[in-house]
Amino acid sequence: MKRIVFGLLLLLSAEVVYLSIRNQELISAQKRLDTYLSAGEAISANSGLELGLMQIADWQTGKVLDVREYQEGQEALIFNLSTTCSLCEEASIYWNALYFKYGDKYKIFGLARDYKEQIAQYVERNAIHFPIFNILKTNHSFDSVIGRTPRTIVVDREGSISDVYEGVGRDLDKKLSKSS
């Protein structure tokens, strides 16, 4: 019995050490992200652009749907990401925070063009809570919006893009707070 208790204590101690190290990594990533956020101004050239017909697929189930169907007439925050983008890794901390803060007011999801295995690793590595979809088909004008990562795209109820941010945008949280 003592050996079992000792073994469990040893295992618990190892877990505490691991979590402490992971916490320090996240704090470091947050500091780097703060620097990146300060550079994220809205790109106004894409305002008014329609989402149009875009087919997406749930990365886990493969279920195909139209992005406007998924949006369901709600305002949306779309995170354009790549699983191989280090800035996307850092932005995921902020994107998760936006999901928890505004998930009841906005349809929030990520878009990627990666393999299922890559997305699974990204989700686990970054403790992603928002849904992610693979982009299957899009129109040419929207391709220009999602051509770079990370980008945060704000979409109105009618499916028109109101703002596009390189990264996550330093004023996005303030803007969302005012409109909520």
Image (cartoon, rainbow, N blue to C red):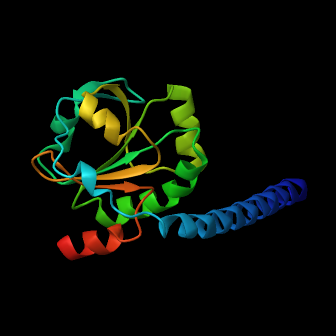
* Residue placed most toward the observer, 36 or 77: 36
- Residue visible at 53% across and 35% down in the picture: 120
Q: What is the tally of numbered marks visible in this picture?
A: 0
Q: Position of residue 23 (x, y in %)?
A: 67, 65
Residue 172 visible to an observer of this rendering: yes
Left or right: where 54 falls relative to 74:
right
Quadrant of the image containing the N terminus = bottom right
Left or right: where 100 falls relative to 175:
right
Quadrant of the image containing the C terminus = bottom left
- Residue visible at 50% across and 27% down in the picture: 116
- Farthest residue in the right direction? 3
* Residue placed most toward the observer, 63 or 148: 148
Residue 180 visible to an observer of this rendering: no
Left or right: where 23 falls relative to 127:
right
Q: Position of residue 65 (x, y in %)?
A: 23, 27
* Residue placed most toward the observer, 45 or 91: 45
- Residue visible at 73% across and 66% down in the picture: 20
- Residue visible at 18% across and 29% down in the picture: 53
Dividing the picture into quadrants, the one containing residue 121 is top right
Dividing the picture into quadrants, the one containing residue 113 is top left
